[in-house]
Image (cartoon, grey):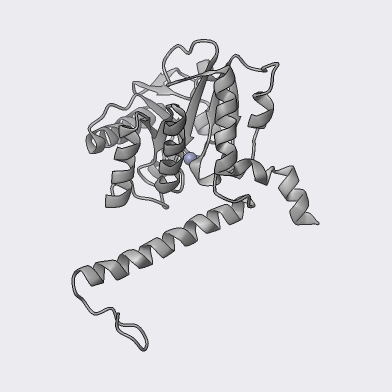
Amino acid sequence: MKTNSNSQQFHFHDFTLHNYVSLLKRAQEFYNFESFTDSIPPGSIILRHDIDLSILHAFKMAQIEEMLGIKATYFVQLHSEFYNPLDKTNFGLLRRILDMGHKLGLHFDTHFWGINSEDQLEKFISFDKELLENIFEIEIDVFSFHNNNEFTLQWSKNRIAGLINVYSSYFKEMGYCSDSVGYWRYDRLEDILKPPLKFDRLQILIHPCWWQERALPPRQRIYNLIDDNNTYLKRLWDSTLKQFGAKNIDWEEIY
Ligand SMILES: [Zn+2]
């Protein structure tokens, strides 16, 4: 059956939170978890999370890492169609992620700004960096590009607008593992955590939205996330009207 073959080919069962715990524990046997700096020592993993769809999913992942004593960097978008980091709930969750000892980076969207030159790149990375810094009263020293293309991948400088570039030549020299769009794009994480180790330094990109309670196809994982968010917003609407003592009128009943 097609569904079964996709499940095996794209390792649906890898992307559960339960398996995430197992993979992190295995990684801890061989590597130290380090933050993004200009010089990464051998034997290090840098754990990077680009938040593309849901801060709630990022928060759940941050809790798992805290339980294991692991620190990661969460890269936040300021122009996402899927979440607003300034809304009350998301702002609170991101603050709690910081309180756990994780870091925030800028997940920068060149497409939003329509950037086509280095000057514009510097200008708008600085602009978004300052916004993020002012909102959370922190310093941001690293960024990642959202939705890479030929334009973004040509920038291999170690720093742009003063921020560490996770796609620089320096970071490209080390091992890289990514779950972009819900499946392993290069090596499967489980495979590269088996001795003999293929890499002495490793950047792992994990998008929190792809890791859920149940093993599902990537498309269904995102539909779930969107449905859960809709349910949350409906409950928020009902509770808000109740809080203000307003009538919440349906076809037949008033709540
Ligand atoms: Zn992204």
Seen from the viewer's position, the closer of residues 238 and 187 is 238
Farthest residue to the right: give it: 1
Residue 129 appears at what percent x and percent y? Answer: 31, 32
Residue that appears at 34% across and 32% down: 100
Is 91 on the left or on the right of 46, as rendered?
A: left
Count numbered badges in the picture.
0
Quadrant containing the C terminus is: bottom left
Farthest residue to the front: give it: 67
Residue 63 appears at what percent x and percent y? Answer: 42, 38
Residue 25 appears at what percent x and percent y? Answer: 56, 28
Is 20 on the left or on the right of 102, as rendered?
A: right
Q: State whether residue 69 is above or below residue 38.
A: below
Whether residue 174 appears in this view of the structure is no
Is 193 on the left or on the right of 252, as rendered?
A: right
Whether residue 201 appears in this view of the structure is yes
Residue that appears at 51% across and 32% down: 151
Farthest residue to the left: give it: 244
Seen from the viewer's position, the closer of residues 106 and 200 is 200
Residue 61 appears at what percent x and percent y? Answer: 46, 39
Quadrant containing the N terminus is: bottom right
Seen from the viewer's position, the closer of residues 130 and 8 is 8
Q: State whether residue 127 is above or below residue 12.
A: above
Q: State whether residue 230 is above or below residue 245.
A: above
Residue that appears at 78% across and 55% down: 2
Residue that appears at 30% across and 33% down: 99
